[in-house]
Image (cartoon, helix red, strand yellow):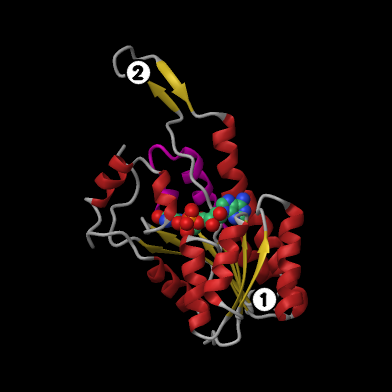
Amino acid sequence: MLEIKDAVAVVTGGASGIGLAFAKYWVKRGGRVLLGDVSVPALEAAKASIGDAAEIVACDVTCEADNQRLAQTAIDAFGKINLVAPFAGIIKDGLMLAPDRETGKVVSKMSLDQFRAVVDVNLTGVFLTVRECAEQMINNGDRGLICLVSSTGSLGTAGQINYSSTKAAVSVMPKVITAEFFRRGVADRIRCVAVAPGYVATPILEGMNQKALARILENVPIGRLIEPDEIASLVCELYRNEALTGDVYFIHGGLRLGSKG
Ligand SMILES: NC(=O)c1ccc[n+]([C@@H]2O[C@H](COP(=O)([O-])OP(=O)(O)OC[C@H]3O[C@@H](n4cnc5c(N)ncnc54)[C@H](O)[C@@H]3O)[C@@H](O)[C@H]2O)c1
């Protein structure tokens, strides 16, 4: 079992929602964090609320150089990386094609920008953060975990072809990364998993169709949104327990998975 005390986590999307809640949870248990985010005022507020155990760095995860700086800052500030938590993510929901209910003709479609923006942050951004931070971990001889965030959307949610596609892609990464690390003899010290939450009470949900969200919530057996601390608790257990690697861990309050066809 790994100890959280003195362990160093690099968290993108660390200025809000799950990333911020996780950072606070981790620090309360003796860990230290480097928070990266595009929102600098929110990062500064996060630092003020966490204190000396947190460092911050402006980072757009879609930018290769920003991810390199993020990983290097963790080493410069703390000397090691034990947990990589690339939690930055966005949604830009919409139907791929929307035929008019009366005429049957397509009246709108998802733009290329709307598709690409989500791929850039949720998929390419995750790849870059993980690649840069894991390189530092390997070269530095560090031990720990890469914990990705997929979603129940990985199983297919109507209105989210961009988001669902990125989360499905992220959910295959633990297998790929674990297999690659196994081949090169580092899988025993650097593990990789993903958590796949259902609907969590964070600002990202404000970008969803609220009627659709209310209908989804009627089908959540625990009868409420997941709390960010409940995700943080799972991530901490995945970090501590070194038997856990190469897989995706769902946390959704019993939600029926996937859109009805
Ligand atoms: N809230 C949910 O219901 C839910 C469910 C499943 C998965 N997730 C995933 O959890 C992760 C965190 O989401 P959240 O709910 O905390 O959302 P959130 O909107 O509260 O936080 C996301 C953070 O990412 C940052 N961000 C956005 N684009 C960025 C970029 N290019 N570079 C760096 N930072 C960027 C934002 O500034 C924000 O601080 C996301 O990957 C999301 O897809 C959330």
Q: Is residue 169 magenta?
A: yes
The image quarter in which residue 37 lies: bottom right
Q: Which range is magenta? A: 152-173
Type of amino acid at the residue the image marks with label 1: Ile
Work out whether residue 94 or residue 194 is closer to the camera in this orientation and state it.
94
The residue under label 1 is 81
Work out whether residue 64 or residue 146 is closer to the camera in this orientation and state it.
64
The structure residue drawn at horizontal position 64% and vertical position 49%, both measured from the top left corner, is: 124
Residue 164, horizontal then vertical, whole percent: 46, 45
Is 101 located above or below residue 159 in the figure? above
Residue 244 visible: no
In the rendering, which numbered label is found on residue 149?
A: none
- Labels 1 & 2 near each other (Cβ < 8 A): no
Which circle's residue, 1 or 2, is located before the other in the chain?
1
Left or right: 7 as drawn, with respect to 74:
left
The image quarter in which residue 128 lies: bottom right
SS of the residue at dot 1? loop
